[in-house]
Amino acid sequence: MPINLHFFRNNELEKLDYSKVFEFFDNYPAFTIYYGDDDVQIICSDDDFKFTYRYLVTKKSRVKDIYKLDPTYSNVNFMLELPVMIPNFLAKEILNITLKICKTFNLAIYNDSFKDVKEFNSVDVLMLFEKMRTQYINEFGLNGKIKYPTQKLSEICKYQRSIDSLKEMYQHEIDVLPITPIQDKNTKVFGISVMFHVGHPTIFPPNLDFVYVHDELNNIFLVKRVDFYTIIGKYLIEIDSVLPDMYILKKKQAKSSRKIITKLRKEAIEDSQFTNIRICDLIDDI
């Protein structure tokens, strides 16, 4: 159930040039524009978090009771469908893009919960987002989503979004491990995991719970964070200037760390019942 944000424009301004709107989205590689008979879908496919959302340009207005709204504004048949069951971090990113759209094209917004058309305000819309998400959970439950502490969720989202820039920072000479939440299908034990290749210089993200260890014989086994860091900790350096609880295994130490593989293997746990979860399926537990 998304939040529909409808865009309006003051009647004193010239009509919205949709070609310029499409040019705006062309500057964002994650967006693809699909032209249909009844609408134009502008879909963002977020590879970092494996989810999609969209803006729509429609032939007809989809605003209910439009005649009750301020007549100095006209609906431009352009709208955002904001997902509610996503982390706050992603909602804020979407709203930042929406703010740029409103500023670029002099647009105001309207939602059915508003009294009237109003200027875009990220704080107000984020409050609406959190309210609607709470209502959805109260009515329909989590539907497979998992509540996760807000601060930790923000940190792992920031890390996940920064993977490419971290690779560049270290001249692509260090593995920057993407995060994968996992959950045991039977026990419902949940945690944040990464895949570590033994012997590789590596950055480990914040708030890890598990590490998949990929050894030099192509064997893969799962180790709990506490056991992994107890064994490999002497080779790691914390880089909390970027994010708290983030560590680096540099090239020289990575070579030395190969000799602890036997100790790690002894700490392997059963992992056959663990399944992968998307980060976007974690919900802020405020």
Image (cartoon, rainbow, N blue to C red):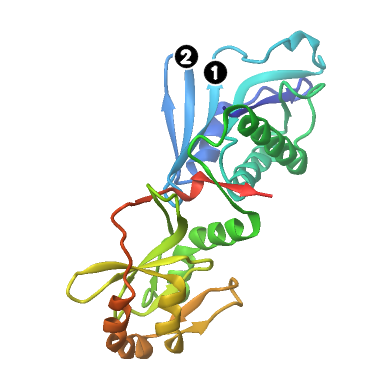
Measured as percent of width and height from the top left, residue 59 is found at: 54, 13
Residue 69: quarter of image: top right
Q: Which x, y percent locates residue 109?
A: 72, 28
Look at label 1 and name its amino acid. Answer: Thr
The residue identified by callout 2 is 38
Nearer-the-camera pick, 148 or 131: 148
* Residue 192, image x, y percentages: 46, 60
Q: What residue do we see at 29% from left, 77% from top?
A: 266
Is 263 left, or right, of 8 in this rendering?
left
Q: Is residue 147 above or below residue 151?
A: above
Q: Is residue 62 above or below residue 135?
A: above
Q: Compare marks 1 and 2 and give the one earlier in the sequence.
A: 2
Front position in the image: 262 or 86: 262
Name the residue furthest left: 217
Quadrant holding the N terminus: top right
Residue on which disc 1 sits:
58
Count the marks. Answer: 2
Q: Residue sitting at 71 percent across and 24 percent down?
A: 111
Q: Secondary structure at mark 2?
A: loop
Neighbour class for label 2 at 10 Å: few (<14), some, many (≥20)?
few
Name the residue at 48% across, 66% down: 208
Secondary structure type for disc 1 = strand
Quarter-of-image position of residue 257 = bottom left
Relative to 39, 222 lies left or right: left
Q: Nearer the viewer, residue 232 or 44?
A: 232
Crowdedness near tag 1: few (<14), some (14–19) or many (≥20) residues, C-alpha within 10 Å: some
Quadrant for residue 235, please give it.
bottom left
